[in-house]
Amino acid sequence: MIKKTPQTVILLNFGCPDIQQLARAIRANHIYTMVMPWTTPLARVMQEEPVGLILCRDPRAQEHPREKEAFQKAGVPILCLEDGSLDAQAALAFCREECGCQGLWRMEAFLEEAVQEVRQQVGDKKVVLGLSGGVDSSVAAALIHRAIGKQLTCVFVNHGLLRLGEPEQVQSVFRDAFDMNLVYVDASDRFLDKLLGVTEPERKRKIIGAEFIQVFAEAAAKVDAPFLGQGSIYPDFLESIPLDGDPKGVIKSHHNVGGLPEKMDFQLVEPLARLFKDEVREVGRLLGLPPVMIDRQPFPGPSLGVRCVGEVRREYLRMLREADAIFTEELRASGWYAKTWQAFAAFLPVKSVGMHEGQRRYGYTIALRAIQTSDAVTAQVVHLPWDLLEKVACRIPQEVEGISRVVFDCTPKPPATIEWE
Ligand code: XMP
């Protein structure tokens, strides 16, 4: 996963919560950094041939004995930063002045290297990749395709819970524009039949997740590829490394595609494993992916399944899709799409009385949500302009058959969660 890159500075993490932000700030200045937990053996650290080490610790924490070891044996310049003073300027000055970093890390060069690396790893074998249409899997697909062309087959599963136009868009970009081998599996009926009558959110998630693995595994088996391409990115790995060697310290476990059964025995191809999200977007732009695919907001795995509150029915999904598309269209037109981390519609199976073309209409409810966050652990509500909200609130009941009322969810996280379910 990790390879040698010239002029690497290593951040050794002694329990510093802001270390990812620091790494990103240094990389934004074209200096390549890697984060490693303090438990990494020094020999492993030195394998990367770093030109400097930055020790990042929590000032509440006592100096750790391993710090001394690193100091004494590394033989490269060392900077010690404490959490409260995680000063990117100081770190950058250290990299440039003491480590001699020239700031030569460029995405163009990364892309070239990554393409070569994929070719080398895969040889003349085949790769299968589960394409969700999200940023990471799309960029991984485009990169692997640049490396090995038709040896890559992407599998796109339509589980019937996608947003308006999504299946068409993914096919038009990847099959038509990029000329990729794309297997499109319309499994909508399979998923939606299984979900009928199910109202409990976690149960819905389990059904969608299990069905997804099954459908993907069936399609992947037909490709008969020894390699599985994945869009795992650097934070996926960082968050799965226990800081102190204790697995309880894991923030998020890194799994391959939705937890594919291990017996499938794929070798993984993960060309984005060294990149942060903003770097993945830059690579996507270099690869020629359209902005609409690169700049999109995060979308949950269970998709509209957790935005259709309670039971998921085809008719509810139709209303939700149309309403969400109107909201997104207005957000984009007003420039607010780029200024929100996530903004979406949720369907509420609550009926109320409304008026449509002079007639009484007893219809359902759409909730609008717009939030800003840096890590999705807490989130603030975005104060969208009232004019914009009012326009969307008028358009949805006018244009979406079956909706009579629109509400705005003004609850931060906590006490609410971002999704309704
Ligand atoms: P919550 O609702 O927990 O959401 O505040 C936090 C972030 O996670 C996304 N989310 C999910 N993503 N599978 C996913 O892949 C899920 O089951 C899931 N539930 C929530 C949500 O969209 C938000 O970005």
Image (cartoon, grey):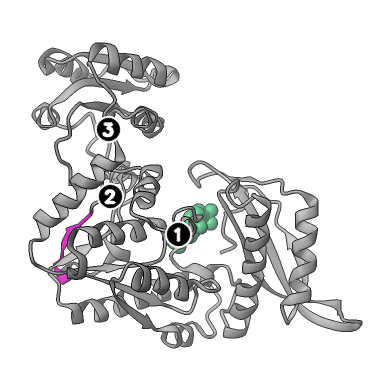
* Residue that numbered label 3 is attached to: 105
In x, y percent, where is residue 248? 30, 44
Q: Earlier in the sequence, mark 1 or mark 3?
A: 3
Q: Looking at the picture, does residue 264 appear above or below residue 360?
A: above
Q: Residue at left 37%, top 76%?
A: 157
Residue 399 in which image quadrant:
bottom right
Residue 269 among those drawn in magenta: yes
Q: Residue at left 40%, top 68%?
A: 173
Q: Is residue 127 left or right of residue 249?
A: left
Give the residues drawn in magenta, as a range.
263-270
Image quarter where the C terminus lies is bottom right
Amino acid type at image mark 2:
Leu
Residue 350 in which image quadrant:
bottom right
Q: Residue at left 16%, top 55%?
A: 118
**Front position in the image: 241 or 155:** 155
Q: Are marks 3 and 2 in contact (CB under 8 Å)?
A: no
User: What kind of element bears circle 2?
Assistant: loop
Amino acid type at image mark 1:
Met
In x, y percent, where is residue 42? 12, 26
**Distance from the alpha carbon under mark 2 to that under mark 1:** 16 Å
* Residue that numbered label 2 is attached to: 272
Amino acid type at image mark 3:
Trp
Q: Looking at the picture, does residue 227 appear above or below residue 155?
A: above
Q: Earlier in the sequence, mark 2 or mark 1?
A: 2
Residue 413 visible in the current orientation: no
**Nearest-to-viewer mark from 3 and 2:** 3
**Distance from the alpha carbon under mark 1 to that under mark 3:** 25 Å
Q: Earlier in the sequence, mark 3 or mark 2?
A: 3
Q: Is residue 307 left or right of residue 104?
A: right
* Residue that numbered label 1 is attached to: 293
